[in-house]
Image: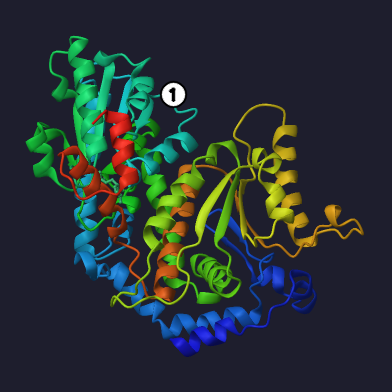
Amino acid sequence: MTEAWTSVEQVEAKTLKALFAAEDDRLQRLTLEEAGIRFDFSKTHLSAQAIAAFERLAEAQDLAGARDALFAGAEVNPTEGRAAEHSAERGQGAPESVARSSAFHARMRALIDAIEAEAFGPVRHILHIGIGGSALGPDFLIDALGRDAGRYEAKIVSNVDGAALEEAIADFDPHATIIAVASKTFTTMETLLNTRSALAWMEQAGVSDPYGRVVALTAAPDKAVEFGVDETRILPFSETVGGRYSLWSSIGFPAALALGWEAFEQLLEGAAAMDRHFRLAPLHRNAPVIAAFHDRYYANVRKSQTRAVFAYDERLRLLPSYLQQLEMESNGKSVTLDGAPVGRETSLITWGGVGTDAQHAVFQLLHQGTHLVPVEFVAAVEPGHALDEEHHRQLLINCFAQGAALMAGKSSEDPHRNYAGDRPSTTILLDRVDPFTIGALLAFYEQRTFVNAVLLGINPFDQFGVELGKSMAKAIDNGEDLGFDPSTKALMARAFGE
Ligand code: F6P
């Protein structure tokens, strides 16, 4: 492994222009078309030599074996003693896991049918309460795909700040609302507190059986029952589906309800198509694999600290937030699977925004700042609106121009007006924003995250780093004095007057 890393680190650094000049087939080699998505990695510093070195690293790290283990439902998350079976949710996994997921999906569909048949009376609003992986996926899906659905109005509430819930329910009719409580563990403080307050809102409005309007989406059905949710309204999913990988499971319930079951199935099909590509394509033509080589190249060879994702499509505006959790919670680690220091940079810090807004705000740094930030543009050929087509033409023109400008630069004798250029970007161009393509796109990001972890030898499926802050908050809540530092004590005294 060290030897393989050394040859990656020793890859000759060439400029993007030099790479295009030296490699005739560069565009064709580094452009992949899969499941309605074009991935163009040609404006990155991945040379043919770099890809070959990464392929050797992938072999040294037994990527093929790790991939097989993932899909076979083996224990790829050893620190929690679990498999990671999000792919089984889309039919790609061990037969027994796929069968279990299908049974859970059938249960979800039956409840959706019941809601549509007005078993809960007329329902117009879905109040989805969850946080992290139990919120970001559904939020992204509904925002991206649900604009014209017109079926139900869905709001996602995650923050424990009461202002979030207050705003969400302001225009909701409590008598026509279903509360979807999404929590894998059903112990998350924010989610339970928000749910209690939502129930109180219903009660105050005279809803006769508020608990009867709660649907629980969870891998801990016993806890949901303890909370007061009737077993018939619990939609379970498997413990082996990680929170940030869970939108395919019953956590996707509000999306399936708002978009319709057929759309949800297409989402799963798109993800399955990407899974098949990931399993079968040779490494040098494999989109998640090449993307992970890209990430490792910039993190470990060029020492970039961040990567930026810009959605050149309003419908994809929540993609950067979704990816932040997926990538940073998965690979923000310091030790390898056996607990040894990993010895190299792990997750890039994911950030980003929406084009063209970001061009007028943060692109200055990308063009002339001192950091080398690999940029990712995500756009769609078909527009998401019925206004004059000039809007979409300008949107895409700007997207493509930014990639070209980052690479080309422009020299000037005036140092203030000089653009060094040679700044990398990847363009991900969707045929259209539809459930199938979005499913494929999100599965691409999941598998890319997995490949990054395999190359680093880390576990992408646990998240112990989030526990310490939670337990300290609990201690403060319980009035325990953990010997807090003077600064924390003073802040508590100022806020709570203690
Ligand atoms: O605190 C982090 C985390 O555990 C995430 O991994 C997870 O997606 C989120 O909290 C919510 O957890 P739960 O679904 O159990 O409420």
- Quadrant containing the N terminus is bottom left
The structure's colour scheme is rainbow
The residue at the point 24 percent across, 43 percent down is 473
* Count of marks overlaid on the render: 1
- Amino acid at the residue labelled 1: Gly
Looking at the image, the residue that sits furthest to the top is 206
Foreground: 425 or 411?
Answer: 411
210 over 241 or under it: above or below: above
- Picture quadrant of residue 121: top left
Where on the picture, by quarter, is residue 63? bottom left
Q: Position of residue 425 (x, y in %)?
A: 66, 59
Relative to residue 154, is residue 195 drawn left or right?
left
* Residue 254, horizontal then vertical, whole percent: 33, 34
Question: Secondary structure under badge 1?
Answer: loop
Q: Is residue 80 above or below residue 284?
A: above
Q: Determine the residue positioned at 29% across, 75% down.
A: 339
| Residue at point 46%, 54% (across, down) | 440
List x then y, in percent, for residue 249.
28, 47
- The residue wearing badge 1 is 150
Q: Is residue 122 visible?
A: no
Compared to residue 472, the image places residue 327 above or below, namely below
Q: Quadrant of residue 432?
A: top right
Residue at the spot x=8%, y=37% of the render?
225
Residue ranking furthest to the bottom: 3
On the rendered structure, is 195 left or right of 263?
Answer: left
